[in-house]
Image (tube, helix red, strand yellow):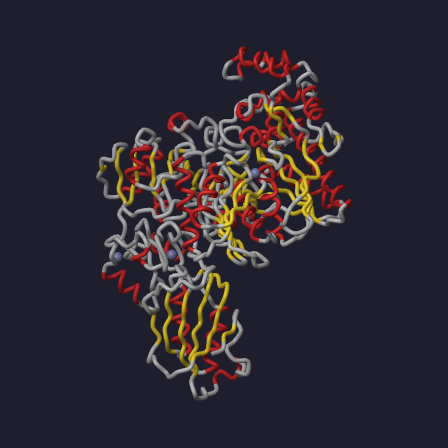
Amino acid sequence: MAVTNCCRSIRQNVYDRESATKPERWPLLRAKVKVTGIVQGVGFRPFIYRTAVTIGLKGYVKNRGDAGVEILLEGGEQAIKNFLEDLKEKKPPLAQIYDIITTTLEGREEYDKFTIEKSSNETELSGSVIPPDIAICNDCLRELRDPKDPRYEYFFITCTNCGPRFTIIEKLPYDRENTTMRTFPMCGFCLREYKDPLNRRFHAQTVACPQCGPKVYLTDARGKQVKHKDPVREAGKLLSEGHILAIKGYGGFHVATSTTKETPLTKLREVKHRSQKPFAIMARSLEAIKTFAIVSTKQVELLTAHTRPIVLLDKSQDYNLSDLVAPGLHNVGVMLPYTGLHYMLFDKVDDAAFVMTSANPPNQPIINDNDEALKALGKTVDYFLFHNRQIAHRCDDSVIRTHNGNVVFLRRSRGYAPAPIMLKEKAKRCVVGLGGELNNTACVLNGDKAFISQHIGDVENVETKAFLETATKHLIRLTTSKVDTIACDLHPKFTTTRLAQDLAQENVWRLVQVQHHYAHVAALMVEHNVDEILGVCCDGYGYGTDGEAWGGEILLCTTGAFGFKRVAHLENQPLIGGDLATRYPLRMAAGMLFDKADVENWLLQNKHNLPHGEEEARIILQQLKKGTGVVETTSCGRVLDAVSAVLSVCFERTYEGEPSMKLESTAMKGRDVLKLKPITRGDALDTTQMLLTIYESRDKYSKADLAYSAYAYLARGLATMAVEKALENGVKNVGFSGGVACNAILSLAMRRIVEAANLHFLVHEAIPPGDGGLSFGQTVASGFSQF
Ligand SMILES: [Zn+2]
Ligand SMILES: [Zn+2]
Ligand SMILES: [Zn+2]
């Protein structure tokens, strides 16, 4: 028995394709072909069936318990060769092939036709995975609108090429009985299509129609059904009229309302305790988006992709939605409908868009159960639009922005998870990473693939911790990974660190703790397959190797992703009141400017921007005068917060990143009027003098110009230091990572400086620069090191 790997043909001496019409020679061959990749839930078996039948091969195809597909072929050499070529070249659009393992078999002819066999539970191959959820395809959308089609106006119309996958699958292989579609037996019509090799729904596991599929219904806030023959369009009308609805989708609930009416938006902000955090919106069409936002070609491509992420778009001059949608920001997060239900919501109304925000209470995972939704949201919403299919795995919407046409993931979740990031090399070990404390994801590194979980959220309480644990175990199972190492943050008190310790003990896995900023930079190195880098890593907070609060770091990594040296950082600044300084940027600014400017008067003038007014201002001043026992930080996020307070842009952080996001929006139309020269002391880049100059220039220049000048200074300072260190060490790459790397002004300004020095400027393309990418960094830092 000969085994060949990776798409090599089964015999080297077979004749070429042109001679395929020659009569087949005897004896016939038998071959077993195992395919790994994203090959279940993408119409792969129907494709194999049609290909084999067309070529005249006999045998079978079946799904396996390891998410792979197994094919047995009987036929002539040339026919099998042609089949293997078609397998690679004509595969369905959503399929991804990682490996084709072909084995020639001895034995006699056994099959008289080609069939799709019952799936097996075999699991010896790892690395395959089921696909993410896929937005409704054009064929289904056309049928949804066709009065002659049996699925006309069916809200959950799907086919082999579209519909939910990740969010409905409970276990492998991907068969209907292993999904939450199990409770909806197919009617005669659906079954006929399911069994018809020529039909688009041949072996489509989500096939359903108004007769046999999930049903949608409307209830009031207490769960009492509101009888209506057209509940979806009625829900759309209720939204347009100014009601608040909870709408159940594929991977969770959205809370939805009008984008133009102040009353429901104000109520929603009050009950959700979200005074400022931007709401994502769903627009009826691209044309509708263009009435309020500017859309580039790249952004059109992203908005209409089958992944259907939320894309941050600049508000246009004609922006006519309420200011309560995305207060104080220059951009707004927009997505297009991705199910039949979403499209139908807009049918009977003229609204350009509806608010569609994830329905989770603060710091809780997304709600996925009807009863849970009633309990959690009954006081928030006026109505529920439910359906009766269970959600197996919750999955929030993904969020993307672009920097000059380059994709920047703010959140990589629905549409992307659990599809892997393909690496250039195979890892030395199989690692699971648990990420950090905020914006968490988990990641499984298996060979040359890294599978990042859906967005988990902030792991600060039992619910999110439990969600992280379930999602991690599910991901390990889905990818048939044999984990031997678990990676987590260096912080001794993080919930994720403790969970990693527990799991390591329970499963006898090696535990590796990875420093936060090094994980960010290691991620960048592996993403770009480089062995050396000067990594600039800017974010809010990460536990340093010295136990201090880091967040504005320049790390030198010269031996692959095996370790780092901290070569420079931002100046240490006092965090007056610890976490309170993160919440109230005035504290940060006061700490940085203390005894350099007339801070006492300034703080007292701004006392109304502190929750406890003058009393609090005086305590802050006392602490500063005493000067002892104050924690310090090198965080870039905190410096931007301080600038934001000095310019009166934002005095309270009600959501993560708020002061710096609003500062970026303020700076959008600014210029670098101050042209500050970088000041360095030892390995530290000054931030005090920078803030002081901005403080003293408040009456001379506009907020926009001063905000821009602050970014320009930081970009110049950080990039120049990184370039110097790179040249000193003969390193060709300078990278930018961490949550602050989502900032377009800073990233683009740094790129100009680095590229002017003839060095490569590397940023994240496939994973989030923020802490959503941390689990990936932890796994690659552990999976490629040589301990
Ligand atoms: Zn479809
Ligand atoms: Zn049916
Ligand atoms: Zn970070």
Depth order, front residue of 3/710: 3
What residue appears at the point 41 percent right and 51 percent down from the top-left corner?
A: 133
Residue at the extreme right: 728
Q: Is residue 125 above or below residue 726?
A: below
Q: Is residue 445 visible?
A: yes
Q: Is residue 425 left or right of residue 142?
A: right
Q: Is residue 276 above or below residue 530?
A: above
Depth order, front residue of 742/110: 110
* Residue 34: x %, y % from top left: 44, 69
Where, by quadrant of the figure, is residue 68 drawn? bottom left
Depth order, front residue of 723/405: 723
What residue appears at the point 69 percent right and 25 percent down from the top-left corner?
A: 688
Q: Is residue 470 above or below residue 72?
A: above
Q: Is residue 354 visible?
A: no
Q: Quadrant of ligand 3?
A: top right
* Residue 314: x %, y % from top left: 55, 37
* Residue 56: x %, y % from top left: 40, 79
Depth order, front residue of 181/327: 181
* Residue 350: x %, y % from top left: 38, 38
Tag count in the figure?
0
What residue appears at the point 45 percent right and 88 percent down from the top-left corner?
A: 25
